[in-house]
Image (tube, helix red, strand yellow):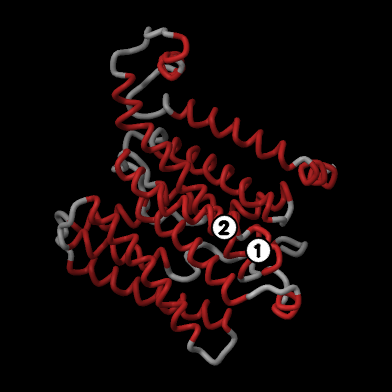
């Protein structure tokens, strides 16, 4: 039964994309009614479709709550989930390792160090996001530059350099937390590192969407190359692929996606590891199918997690905590899986 279901979606992957797109719109619309300030579903639907129906019979605070608070959060959750999922999907294929996540080259740790530095210096929210994005991208490119000068296997050198960069940046972040003002910046650094969408606004969404779009477009253009990069180097070279160039382009695209996601919502882990595996089970390993399905499913997943984060308790739960609570058991299940992953 399971094999028949997988075969069905492999053959009808366009239907899976359409179904996920419809589900994404439905989840985002329903999420507008979820939060500390109660809005009825009827008010939300009436307001959303009021330009079409002309009906304005909804609570007077509905436009303010929807536009200023919930819509930016839902859009950012959708964008971050999609970006992390596609980035993880690309890295797993490029490194031929299903246990690779988007922070394999240290982008999350570097972005966290940059954000912690900006918070300690008292920069604005926009400055913190800019520092996170710049430090994340710069450190990844530094890792690539160091790995290229290595005389060892390039893939292994890249991974080890990423681990080194991540460790160094984590040390910087820990030091900044140690010297930070415990009454002001320390709490803000800690909260940012746990991942949250509480301070996201439409301006931040508009800034983050551009590097994400560039990253998505690059990876989509590389979809055929990614299908070849998962092969051995000798096979890929025999098919006329410039491995060094293509891997560099994938790293650039995935870094733009990861860095933009981190600067928008902080450190949100496990999404880029879990979602690509689920998507492979649905539509297979062909990147023509895997990229759009990963983007949609990742966005839906993070929107639902954010709904839980702002509705489970009176106080908001950092979204990074919830993704870790889901991700850690998934990782254990992945390791214990009998068949090859």
Query: Above or below — where is 237 with respect to 80?
Result: below
Residue 124 rendering spot, x and y as whole percentages: 19, 52
- Which residue, given by chain and number where applicable, does mark 1 sit on? 226
Residue 28 rendering spot, x and y as whole percentages: 49, 31
The image shows a total of numbered marks equal to 2
Residue 226 rendering spot, x and y as whole percentages: 65, 63
Q: Residue at x 50, y 84 (%)?
A: 148
* Front position in the image: 273 or 137: 137
Q: Residue at x 25, y 72 (%)?
A: 175
SS for callout 2: helix
Query: Above or below — where is 44 with respect to 167?
Result: above
The outermost residue toward the front is 240
Quadrant assignment, res 173: bottom left
The CA distance from mark 1 to mark 2 is: 8 Å
Residue 140 rendering spot, x and y as whole percentages: 42, 71
Question: Callout 2: 10 Å neighbours few (<14), some, many (20+)?
Answer: many
- Which residue, given by chain and number where applicable, does mark 2 sit on? 219
Q: Which mark is residue 316?
A: none
Quadrant assignment, res 337: bottom right
The quarter in which the C terminus is drawn is bottom right
Query: Above or below — where is 254 with respect to 163?
Result: above
Query: Above or below — where is 248 with respect to 45?
Result: below
* Front position in the image: 92 or 286: 286
C-beta proximity under 8 Å, tags 1 and 2: yes
The quarter in which the N terminus is drawn is top right
């Amino acid at each position: 039964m399971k094999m028949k279901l997988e075969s069905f979606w492999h053959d009808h992957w366009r239907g899976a994309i359409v179904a996920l797109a419809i589900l994404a719109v439905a989840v985002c619309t329903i999420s507008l009614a979820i939060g500390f300030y109660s809005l009825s579903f009827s008010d939300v639907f009436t307001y959303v479709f009021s330009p079409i129906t002309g009906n304005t019979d909804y609570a007077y605070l509905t436009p303010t709550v929807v536009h200023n608070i919930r819509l930016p959060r839902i859009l950012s959750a959708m964008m971050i989930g999609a970006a992390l999922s596609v980035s993880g999907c690309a890295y797993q294929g490029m490194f031929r390792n299903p246990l690779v996540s988007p922070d394999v080259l240290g982008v999350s740790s570097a972005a966290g160090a940059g954000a912690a530095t900006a918070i300690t210096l008292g920069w604005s929210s926009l400055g913190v996001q800019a520092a996170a994005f710049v430090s994340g991208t710069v450190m990844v490119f530094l890792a690539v530059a160091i790995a290229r000068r290595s005389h060892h296997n390039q893939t292994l050198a890249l991974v080890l350099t990423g681990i080194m960069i991540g460790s160094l940046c984590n040390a910087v972040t820990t030091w900044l937390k140690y010297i930070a003002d415990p009454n002001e910046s320390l709490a803000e650094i800690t909260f940012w590192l746990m991942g949250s969408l509480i301070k996201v606004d439409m301006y931040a969404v508009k800034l983050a969407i551009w590097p994400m779009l560039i990253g998505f477009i690059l990876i989509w253009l590389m979809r055929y190359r990614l299908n070849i990069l998962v092969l051995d180097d000798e096979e890929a070279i025999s098919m006329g692929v410039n491995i060094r160039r293509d891997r560099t382009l994938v790293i650039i695209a995935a870094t733009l996606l990861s860095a933009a996601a981190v600067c928008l919502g902080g450190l949100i882990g496990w999404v880029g590891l879990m979602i690509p595996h689920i998507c492979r089970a649905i539509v297979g390993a062909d990147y023509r199918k895997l990229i759009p399905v990963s983007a949609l499913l990742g966005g839906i997943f993070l929107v639902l997690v954010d709904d839980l984060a702002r509705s489970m308790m009176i106080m908001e739960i950092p979204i990074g905590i919830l993704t870790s609570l889901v991700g850690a058991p998934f990782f254990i299940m992945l390791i214990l899986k009998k068949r090859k992953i």
